Amino acid sequence: MTPARLFAAQEATWPPASVTQVGPFRIREGQGGGNRVSAASAKGPVNGADLARAEAAMAALDQVPLVMVRPGEDVLDALLAAHGYTVVDPVVMLAAPVATLAAEPPAPVTAFTVWEPLAIMDELWAELGIGAARRAVMARVTGPKTALLGRQNDRAAGAGFAAIHDGLCFVHAMAVAPGHRRQGTARNMMRAAALWAQDQGADQIVVLVTQANAAARALYASLGMRDVGQYHYRMKPTPMPQP
């Protein structure tokens, strides 16, 4: 599972609204869908003039200057730091064979896969900070995809999204209502996602977690998921408007 395969599948399963090439920079239009769909990335040598053109392109989209820095991009990282970009949201990519998670199905009636998402799932996402712009990202996915519904105590307890590209099933937008956390909801949803992915022929299941989210990392580690890559973003602080 190469980094190129991982990052290609990440973008295909959580796609920006549009992509343009500005010199060595790939500029993504996120339309409010979060860092993953709004961050630029670079390929090959980059200099200050290239960065200035990328910043102008992001400004034209009404987006703050934000760049993804992937493994091995130390020169890009140093250039961004020199231009005042600060590190935000270091991310860990965790993966496991689909068969590992699918070997133990979720408890009966605790997790379901369905597409289109049910109204209760949209309500849960909205309550838990996954708004319409992120749900629009899900709608843009063209490959195999499904929504995940978790249930606890006969109530909707969590919602998530899974999609597949090149044999990799990425799980995004996992959210569990506060009153249902630490009761196995997320675990059941991940196992349901793995069963669905297995039926679709995927071989690996992948999640993206911020390094600071210790609880989520512990959950995924308990499911046998291991670190297969890391990246971070750098953002250029925007001046505060004068009163």
Image (cartoon, rainbow, N blue to C red):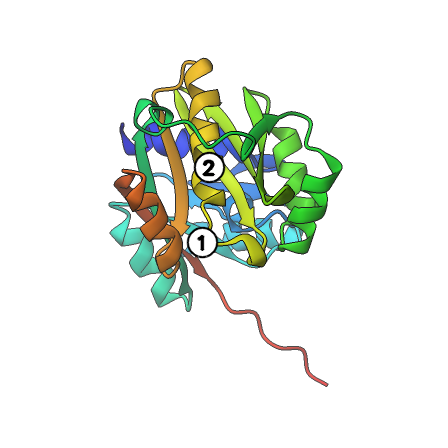
Query: Residue reaching furthest right?
Result: 119
- Residue, disc 2: 188
- Residue, disc 1: 182
- Within 10 angstroms of label 1, few (less than 14), some, or many (20 or more) residues? few
Q: Determine the residue positioned at 56% across, 31% down.
A: 109
Local SS, label 1: loop
Query: In front here: 162 or 80?
Result: 162
Query: In front here: 65 or 70?
Result: 70
Q: Is residue 207 above or below residue 147?
A: below
Alpha carbon of mark 2 to alpha carbon of mark 1: how far? 11 Å
Q: Can residue 116 be spotted in the picture?
A: yes
- Within 10 angstroms of label 2, few (less than 14), some, or many (20 or more) residues? many
Query: In front here: 111 or 131?
Result: 111
Mark 2 belongs to which amino acid?
A: Asn
| Image coords of residue 99 (percent x, y) | 32, 22
Q: Quadrant of the N terminus?
A: top left
Query: Residue reaching furthest bottom?
Result: 243
Q: Is residue 131 above or below residue 105?
A: below
| Image coords of residue 203 (percent x, y) | 34, 20
First reached walking from the N terminus: tag 2 or tag 1: 1
Mark 1 belongs to which amino acid?
A: Arg
| Image coords of residue 47 (percent x, y) | 37, 52
Q: Is residue 7 above or below residue 45?
A: above
Q: Determine the residue positioned at 32% across, 52% down.
A: 218
